[in-house]
Image (cartoon, rainbow, N blue to C red):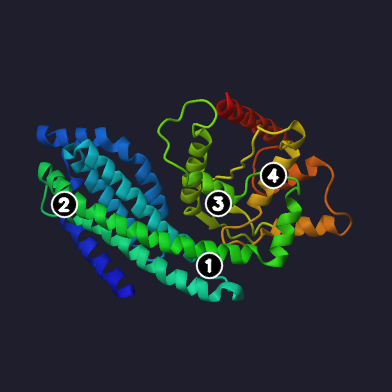
Amino acid sequence: MHKELEETKNSLLEFRERKTDEFFKLDTAKPEERAVVQRWNQYLPSLAAVRGIAMTAAALDPHKIAPIVCACVFFSIDLAFNNLSPETKGKMRNILFESVIAINEWMSFETNFRKTDYDAIKDEVKELQALLTGQYLQALRLLCDILLSRNGSWEKRAGDKMTNKILDFDLRLATLKDHKLRWASKKKVMEETLVGEKEIADILGWIKKKDDPEKSLRDIRVKISSKRILWVNGPYGTGKTTIIYRIVSELQSLSENYLRREQSETPGDEGQLDRLLQVIPYFCTVLTTRSERADYSTIIRALTRKISLMPDFTLARRAETFHGQYTRVSEEPGDITIWEKFLHSVFFKKGCDDLRESLKQSLIDHADGMYE
């Protein structure tokens, strides 16, 4: 792997020295070069979201190759975007997103699992590592080839070359997605093995209220695999809830790729997370009797349960401490403010009063929007 990475890095460094550096020497005093800069600035916002995610993620790459790839690719594509059709632009954005996510999945795995030894999943970790290493290389090569497709080109010729190669890029993206499906299914098995460990399961079960009406993961998977949605606005049964499930599923997938553990020497802070995107869904329904509906206490405890589980499927240190503190004297705290403070200490930076009001407001907004 290291040999392939070194070869990739050297070819990119050579390309950057010969081609990309000259892009930065554009003289806005010259009409023809000023036009290039103006078009570049015009199309820059359309890639800003992709670039922001890519460059932040790439900076975490221990092999220091992803930053070079992403910087060259995004700068190069900015200049060629003026000559791409809307369809090709959309496909190119999708390829960039998927490639960056694939790279970051490998880096997230390296961060969360490589330095931890779990006997229960030792073989699975090795298998996942091999799968993700291949995925990482596939994504890097795809980005590299997008960049090198511009080699020797400028302006319209560069756009034409990208358009001519978009079919090949699409096919390679499909291969990359197939690879991702393989490791995602194995990761799911590994997750269920870890969460099924008795000690972890007992604490997570204790945190969550026993009568919580939240839908199970099985129910959610049935929803998101249901028939295609043709229209999202309508009466009961037209698929509005399914759309919500799909959106949350996509956000969670993106969120999982940007998790990293924050190292801290302060006792009790080892479980803190630094996330670029935070998704903690809670699904319940008002289509039931009032006594069976989730109340504020139910939702607070359900959210607490979700964030107590770390990205590597171990428990946050604070959750273990909190559980031990109260189970010595009673089954669970009776005052909801105790759960609020615990939730705040693990995750939220705002005060408990603000937390209560923001959660209530968001719940009202979502209920109105979904069931009007």
Element type at mark 3: strand
**For the residues bearing labels 3 and 4, Cβ distance under 8 angstroms:** no
Which numbered marker is on residue 113? 1
**For the residues bearing labels 2 and 1, Cβ distance under 8 angstroms:** no
Rounded to the nearest whole Å, what is the CA distance between mark 2 and mark 3? 37 Å
- Would you place residue 114 above or below residue 242 in this image? below
Left or right of 180: which side holds 343?
Answer: right
Instruction: Name the residue tied to disc 3.
Output: 274
Instruction: Name the residue tied to disc 4.
Output: 344
Rounded to the nearest whole Å, what is the CA distance between mark 1 and mark 3? 17 Å
Instruction: Name the residue tied to disc 2.
Output: 150
- Would you place residue 105 above or below residue 349 in this image? below
Residue occupying the point 24% across, 67% down: 10
Within-10-Å neighbours for mark 3: few <14, some 14–19, many 20+: some
Element type at mark 4: helix
Rounded to the nearest whole Å, what is the CA distance between mark 4 and mark 1? 27 Å
Q: Picture quarter containing residue 9? A: bottom left
Asked if one can make out residue 369 in the rendered structure from this viewpoint, the answer is: yes
